[in-house]
Image (spheres, coloured by chain):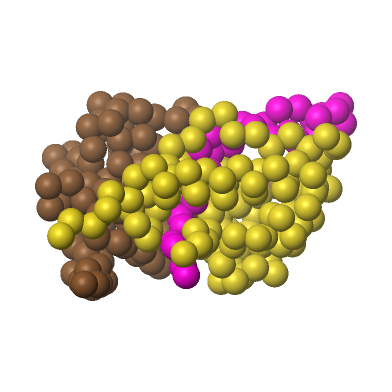
Chain colours: A yellow, B brown
Amino acid sequence: MDKKPSGSEDEAAIRQVVESWTAAVRRRDFEGILRNHASDIAMFDVPPPFQIRGIEAYRKSWDLFFSWSSDPVPFDITEMSITASADVAFVVATMRCAEPGPDGKQKPLDFRLMMGLRKIEGRWIITHEHHSVPAES
Amino acid sequence: MDKKPSGSEDEAAIRQVVESWTAAVRRRDFEGILRNHASDIAMFDVPPPFQIRGIEAYRKSWDLFFSWSSDPVPFDITEMSITASADVAFVVATMRCAEPGPDGKQKPLDFRLMMGLRKIEGRWIITHEHHSVPAES
């Protein structure tokens, strides 16, 4: 018997995970940011270091981000695609946040995002994140 | 009835796809580089532009890369993890290539990679790539 197509139900659940994460970032809500992350999350972030491992280091990366940001914190999805099976998925998105400009005022910063997720005990969990901007040419 | 664990067979096939891609880059073999890519591949690359779409634009990104590289072209996986279900998978890796240094000599460049893959008609196909280095601090 064919298994049920993973399709729209899993995609909707993953969309909800990603959107609740961005909403938590916008309100500087650490508990909300971390809610659907694996304890051994591995992250490639925009600023150094090269690689971040584990939920504590991941949490700390947001301290740096929030130290750059003025309220209201912009952190918005501009485009997103979700590719999901029944238990493994990845998300590809372009996003917009802000960074301090040379005059100290916030200026928009577009960045690229990939996330890897696994469904564990019925819940979609983020195990990997990759945030970046193109290198300066 | 439980479906067969997706485990080792798919992981081995994906490892083979990634390793044949890196080997093709090292020998500047465009046909080998493109062999397991979707025609609508979307890529976030290390240098600008912000986003690349489609196999022709993806192919051209390698012209720029090869124009930077001296033979033998270094393009090596330093660490890789594969997360696979029966039909969706993602790969997270750290890699090493080279870029021209200020003295014109090649210097090592470590970068971060995520790939998204789908199994289509029994073959693992790369649909998304995200290459980056940390932003300059």
Of residues B128 and A16, the one nearer the viewer is A16
Is residue A120 magenta-colored? yes
- Dominant SS type (magenta): strand
Q: Residue at x 59, y 34 (%)?
A: A77
Q: In which quadrant will I find the N terminus of chain A?
A: bottom left
Q: Residue at x 79, y 44 (%)?
A: A27
Is residue B7 placed above or below A62 in the rendered structure? below
Q: Is residue A28 left or right of residue B86?
A: right
Q: Is residue B48 left or right of residue A110?
A: left
Of residues A27 and B93, the one nearer the viewer is A27
Q: Percent position (x, y) of residue A104?
A: 87, 31
Of residues A82 and A55, the one nearer the viewer is A82
Residue stretch rendered in magenta on the structure: A93-121
Q: Percent position (x, y) of residue B112?
A: 47, 54
Can residue A137 be seen from the camera position used here? no
Q: Is residue B90 left or right of residue A34?
A: left
Q: In which quadrant will I find the C terminus of chain A?
A: top right
Can residue A97 be seen from the camera position used here? yes
Q: Residue at x 71, y 28 (%)?
A: A108
Q: Residue at x 49, y 59 (%)?
A: A124
Q: Quadrant of residue A31?
A: bottom right
Q: Percent position (x, y) of residue A119?
A: 44, 62
Q: Percent position (x, y) of residue B50?
A: 50, 30
